[in-house]
Amino acid sequence: MRRQFMETMQLGFISLIPTIVMFVFVFWTKRMLLSFTIATLVGSVLIGGFTFPTVWLDKLQTAWAAGTCGYLVVMLSLFGILIKLLDVSGYSLEFANWMGKYANTRRKAMLITFAMGWLIFVDDYLNNMAVSTAMKNICDKHKIPRTLFGFLVNCTAAPVCVLIPVSTWAAFYSGLFEEMNVRVNGTGLGAYIAGMPFLFYPVILLLICFLIIIGVFPLLGITKKDNELAMQTGIVCSKEESLDGKELHADSANSGETQTKNNPLKFLATMITIVTITIVTKNVMVACMGAIVVVVGIIVFEKKLKLTEVFSHSFEGIASMLTVDATIALALTLVEINKTTGMTDYVITVLTPLLNGSIFAAIVFAFCGAYVFFAGGFWDGSMIFAPIVVPIAVALGVNPLLSCMALVCAATLGSTTFVAGDAVMITSGAVEIKPYYQMLGTFPYALIGYILTIIGFAITGFIVK
């Protein structure tokens, strides 16, 4: 029976139904777990009919067995522990109060958030968690709504990583280019560096972010509405948007200020530990464990908490991430279902006749960007599409490097917008807003970047041969 469920089917247009159902319910109910549960059940019915419960459990097990799901759950649990310990120990508040002397205006608070995103360029997960933990109380104090703050954090994560050739993103794509025999000076890294001028989407999104901070670009959509609410009432996150259903006020951030000397070194020691270990080991999970050891050591040394209290708060930190963990598990289950129904093969078959040499890179980005927004799988998507895109580019007589960079841009788009993607989930967990609103805060700016990037690749396709 299990082997039957692992075989790829060819359901044609019907293969799109589970993903369509997921998005309909997400936008209708704004409840992620419900939406993914229904979508995965619908997909299971398509695959197994009346045996859909067995199919559903099989796909859930497959998602866990693949490794990504377990990795994300463990990593989110570790980050949950770290964030909780920094919170209950008061180290986050001490850092926020100290940093508040420098981030003493809204613009400065947002600029420092933006700058920290560039400083922590090694990995997008690390970037999301570290910047969120360091800056959310400061931004609350200046009535910066959490949806806007989440956009600032998320758009300086993957977009920054792809622009720095020593990040985890650059390492992944350098290896992928090498495997696809797309090389410059004999290496995939050389090809990646040579293709960096074509990374239109991350540059555009970062530019929009900076222009918003300095007041040149207007706020759009939910960030505009939430900003007006925050300025008028001090509510930086409504009950509807909050991850735990609690309304957040700017006053609660101000209430933490004290007249005693604030020591930022304990918080900074934790952040330096996590960044340093990540650079040395190339493993964010190990880095997070090291940071937890450091913060627990400081807490015990200062006698801030008893060891039993440290363990109790650690479990609270794990529990705070359970909703995100469950959503990720169901999202990856839907990915497994889509593989079995043959959704990717169907979409590729439909679009292949539309390909044209000069605008090939633009088509690759337009399609792959839309695909990862609706179906997810940023790096996975690139691994799926690269073996298809590169041979077609060669056959059409166009530069395959341009099309490869279109894949990088598409993955970056998905990282910043896919409602059930790991990056959006991690950011929403750290910023403490529901993933739907995290996505909604980024969407209008990402859409502008999407359109301008298509234009950029279309123009470049006629220039670069």
Image (cartoon, rainbow, N blue to C red):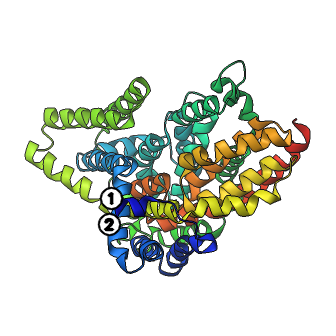
In which quadrant of the rendered view does residue 262 lie? top left
Q: Crowding near pointer 2: few (<14 within 10 Å), some, many (20+)?
A: some
- SS label for mark 1: helix
- How far from the left and from the top, in percent, is residue 336? 45, 59
Q: Crowding near pointer 1: few (<14 within 10 Å), some, many (20+)?
A: some
- Please report the residue visible at 29 percent of the width from the left and 50 percent of the height from the top: 77
From this view, report whether residue 46 is shown above or below residue 284: below
Mark yes or no: residue 81 visible.
yes
Could you tell me how far apart the alpha carbons at marks 1 and 2 are, in whole angstroms? 6 Å
Disc 2 marks a residue whose amino acid type is Leu
- How far from the left and from the top, in percent, is residue 463? 91, 39
Disc 1 marks a residue whose amino acid type is Gln
Label 2 sits on residue = 57
Q: Residue furthest right?
A: 462
- Of 424 and 227, nearer the camera is 424
In which quadrant of the rendered view does residue 291 lie? top left
- How far from the left and from the top, in percent, is residue 381? 58, 50
Contact (Cβ within 8 Å) of mark 1 with mark 2: yes
- Please report the residue visible at 25 percent of the width from the left and 53 percent of the height from the top: 317
- Please report the residue visible at 32 percent of the width from the left and 37 percent of the height from the top: 288
- How far from the left and from the top, in percent, is residue 332? 43, 58
Mark yes or no: residue 445 visible.
no
Circle on res. 61: 1
- SS label for mark 2: helix
- Of 272 and 393, nearer the camera is 393
